[in-house]
Amino acid sequence: RYFLVGSNPAETKYRVLKIDRTEPKDLVVIDDKHVYTQQEVRELLGRLDLGNRTKIGQKGSSGLSRAVSAFGIVGFVRFLEGYYIVLITKRRKMADIGGHAIYKIEDTNMIYIPNDSVRVTHPDEARYLRIFQNVDLSSNFYFSYSYDLSHSLQYNLTILRMPLETLKTETTQTRQESFDIFEDEGLSTQGGSGVFGVCSKPYEKYVWNGKLLEAVRNTVHRDWLLYIIHGFCGQSKLLIYGRPIYVTLIARRSSKFAGTRFLKRGSNCEGDVANEVETEQILYDASVMSFSAGSYSSYVQVRGSVPLYWSQDISTMMPKPPITLDQADPFAHVAALHFDQMLQRFGSPIIILNLVKEREKRKHERILSEELVAAVTYLNQFLPPEHAIIYIPWDMAKYTKSKLCNVLDRLNVIAESVVKKTGFFVNRPDSYCSILRPDEKWNELGGCVVSTGRLQTGVLRTNCVDCLDRTNTAQFMVGKCALAYQLYSLGLIDKPNLQFDTDAVRLFEELYEDHGDTLSLQYGGSQLVHRVKTYRKIAPWTQHSKDIMQTLSRYYSNAFSDADRQDSINLFLGVFKPSEGKPHLWELPTDFYLHHKNTLGLSQTRQSYTYWWTAGVLKYLPLPFDEVTSAENRRKLTVKKFHKYEEEIDIHNEFFRPYELSSFDETFCLAMTNSTRDFMPKNVGIDPSPFTVRKPDETGKSVLGNKNNREETVLQRKTAASAPPPPSEEAVSSSSEDDSGTDKEDEGAVSQRSTPVKVTDTGDSTKITENVVQSTKDVYGVNLSDIPSEDDLAIYSRFVQLGQSQHKQDKGSQQFSSKHNLDRVINLVPISSFSQDNIYEVQPPRADRKSIEIFHAHIQAGRGNMQPLGKDDFLMYREYIRNRYM
């Protein structure tokens, strides 16, 4: 038999799984439900090793030997012989959300379980094995031990904030269970030392190994079950004056009706559509990690094929095969099932952005538009008007060809209206400054405002025909708009606007390009053909030849390799199960019957044509049914009580791993893409803010290094929070066809925001140019006295002379010849806060009581324990706001 020994990351607690190898075709897995310590496991394995040797005292291969070391179980699978176990043998950390690591599978190992002595061979087994391994588990499959990747951040944090009474009643049912190794972050109870841990059921639609774990799901402890998702995961660090903000993009591909481009179109009979991907952008302040004390924000959008029965016949070998509607659906049956799923998961409003062509010489894509409009119109008759599905048709291809229109400006208008309707998720209430001087756009924002922050209600569903190139650009623009609101809600920018050619948007655009390329390779067989730069019309000429190559690659993949990929996906997801006496997978003329269950037998329950939604969904709208506190949702949760010093809920140990030797070179947070290192121009005098618009030709050439321009260099300084708003998106054209216009805008922006200062090379006193725009009263809120006192002037002149002599010494142009100058430098009394301060010893200053109190309050704030603001604090803050902004 095989023994599987699993441990927690600290290797202090272990579980053991026994797998019987004497059964030729059945899977017998025994979980003894006991938690072992390291010492107990060593003793157990020692006894097993000793007991399985043929002769006492013999040290050979006949005892217990280690077969493989792994990071988790993907699942168990059987074709025509016995079961295989699929193990993760290599992993790579891809992202970090609140201290919970997300890993990508790098390599897997399939081990045949039954012994050779009981193996019953079958001639077709090897072929099935080859087809199964055609699904490359090392490309874009992700898992996490402690974070539920199949759900959105909003769902995961909403269940963590469930009322305490609900959790107490739930705990009694699961008290008999033994300890949990990989547990979600705990919830502090009111008083006492108990902490509640919450574990939710995964959302089956986005889990790709659900069928592989089916055989053991009810027999083993849930710590053994590792759910994997397929899609994309990327994370980058946005540094805002040194403050780390992590921008994460997670895409979950649906495992229902999954497949390749021309073979999976439209929807199946259960409302699952082809190429359905849920994209979530998560933004959080990485300086505070825990879910309870940190600031987290997320925004979700969806892409997916048009929810109708339609297909394209690829046997004609045409680049664009004709679109055919396969079944008449006058009551929009499949569309109803699809939108019902969306109402349950996202709430209302559901907004459809349809990007397919509206005008064509030969009717091709327009067929889908007409049918979709009819379906949405029919379904909206029965929904309450305030929760109706919103349909936005926009022919993106037509606008791209037009020279008068700017595609991204138009998309930006759509994006603004969409984000205003759905809102976004943030886990903290609005900051005091945004309540005091609210932005007009902020007040119009939709979603649901609760005491703990904001919830996103409803979702944008974008589609074109393939849901690849046009869809990715539209999603990027909506994501960019949402990102501005997210940054504003976390208090990082003072207006919810982001412009192109800033470090922040470049970083976000690169994430979205990787996301689009990955999803395009999975579904279409090639990378993106049209990118954001293509639609901005700033793509270089070489890009056109690359586009042609991608188109050819996509065509080749669709014509020759898609059928094999489709077979392997069907086998991996358990859509097709091999069995004796039935046709093999490669003998089937089509997989239509596998994906459409109603072709093999009619269901007894028929859905109503008018009440097409699940009972209870409308009652909670606009909130999603999956996130409300109801008896049905409570059944999906497992709740356990821990002691607050329990090792497995210690997020600090989980993240920092004090028991491991770690090197800086291998630390994930240092290796990830960084806005300062990878996007900011390498210039000395450049503004380090990631929200400053950079000129396209700024590619690391030093601005201050050019001697001719040095005298004319304008040093501008502005902070992320205090800069007046940049010119709006409409003012600065995102297309750079007219460069001169853009430069003028940039110069205008500089003079509007800053006080330019000329820097000169000579040792004379620095001159301030005449074009100082604002008075000191405007900038600082204080009128500086006209004539400083004599003492102040004396101190200032000493300071200036010291600076000059230092400057001359650096230049080497003038030696200290006069004794008078030397005395002036040497006789300066060092002013220090240290009572004793020389090169041999230093005496640190004593901190007064008030400073210590301020420091303790700062520490408490980091832990999430905010102190109530006093009357003086409010007055001081109000005075500051009045002086600065009003």
Image (spheres, rainbow, N blue to C red):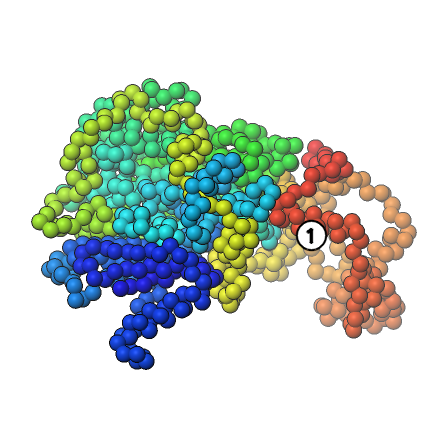
Answer with the quarter of the image where residue 599 lies.
top left
| Relative to 204, residue 601 above or below | above
Query: Residue at coordinates 70% horizontally, 41% vertically from top-left?
Result: 773
User: Is residue 367 visible in this depiction of the protein?
Assistant: yes
Q: Does residue 461 appear to the left or right of 586 in the view shown?
A: right
Query: Residue at coordinates 59% horizontally, 35% vertically from top-left?
Result: 430
Find residue 346 and report its horizontal and vertical position in percent: 40, 34
Q: Does residue 808 appear to the left or right of 402 in the view shown?
A: right
Find residue 324 and report its horizontal and vertical position in percent: 18, 33
Query: Residue at coordinates 49% horizontally, 31% vertically from top-left?
Result: 447
**Foreground residue among 503 and 101:** 101
**If the image is split into quadrants, where does the N terminus sit?**
bottom left
Query: Residue at coordinates 16% horizontally, 57% vertically from top-left?
Result: 81
Find residue 361 and report its horizontal and vertical position in percent: 23, 31
**Foreground residue among 791 and 275:** 275
User: Is residue 729 visible in this depiction of the protein?
Assistant: no
- The residue under label 1 is 758
Number of numbered labels in the structure image: 1
